[in-house]
Image: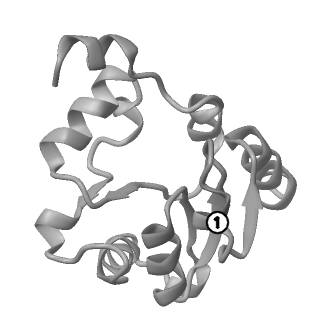
Amino acid sequence: MSSVFREQLQPVEGALRLFESLRIPFCVASSGPRKKIEENLRTTNLYPHFVDKIFSAYEVNSWKPDPGLFLAAASHFGVAPKDCIVVEDSFVGVSAGIAANMTVLGLRMEANDRAVAAANRVFASLDEIHKLFVAQYLSHK
């Protein structure tokens, strides 16, 4: 990872707040190699939230838009795919979530409106997704 990239890499706004509030199993399921995923999470100070919760397509041998990566993560947590929520910002990620029979929340990032249009719901920020989780999943505890 270049030093410029490392210096400029920031977590998506609202990510830390969302991860700290979740009381349900969550993970990162990425098409990237584990080493890169871990480096990015460490650089953004999010790694402590994902220890033992990282799923790499390189290890599962399934790349998005194939649903295998998401299905492996769901199986690891013992959660039925229909009970899983995927947050995605790419067309292949949204497609993989849909193929896995999971609820897909699209996250609009810059000019990717068309990439996430097929999601069950589309959000402009992680803060909006956090509000949804608080309203639907955290307020009943």
Classify 97 as above or below 28.
below
Pick the residue in front: 36 or 138: 36
Q: Classify mark 1: residues with Cα within 10 Å, few (<14), some (14-19) or many (20+).
A: few
Q: Give amino acid for label 1.
A: Arg
Q: Which residue is depicted at the point 64% across and 66% down?
A: 114
- Counting every numbered tag in the picture gives 1
On the image, which quarter does residue 24 sit in? bottom right
Q: Quick check: 81 left or right of 138?
A: left
Q: Quick check: 137 left or right of 7?
A: right
Q: Position of residue 90 (x, y in %)?
A: 49, 61
Q: Quick check: 139 left or right of 14?
A: right
Q: Which residue is depicted at the point 50% across and 69% down?
A: 91
Q: Secondary structure at mark 1?
A: helix
Classify 49 as above or below 55.
above
- Quadrant for the C terminus in the image: bottom right
On the image, which quarter does residue 9 sit in? top left
Classify 90 as above or below 53.
below
Q: Which residue is depicted at the point 54% across and 84% down?
A: 98
Q: Which residue is depicted at the point 41% across and 75% down?
A: 74
State the residue position of label 1. 114
On the image, which quarter does residue 85 sit in? bottom right
- Quadrant for the N terminus in the image: top left
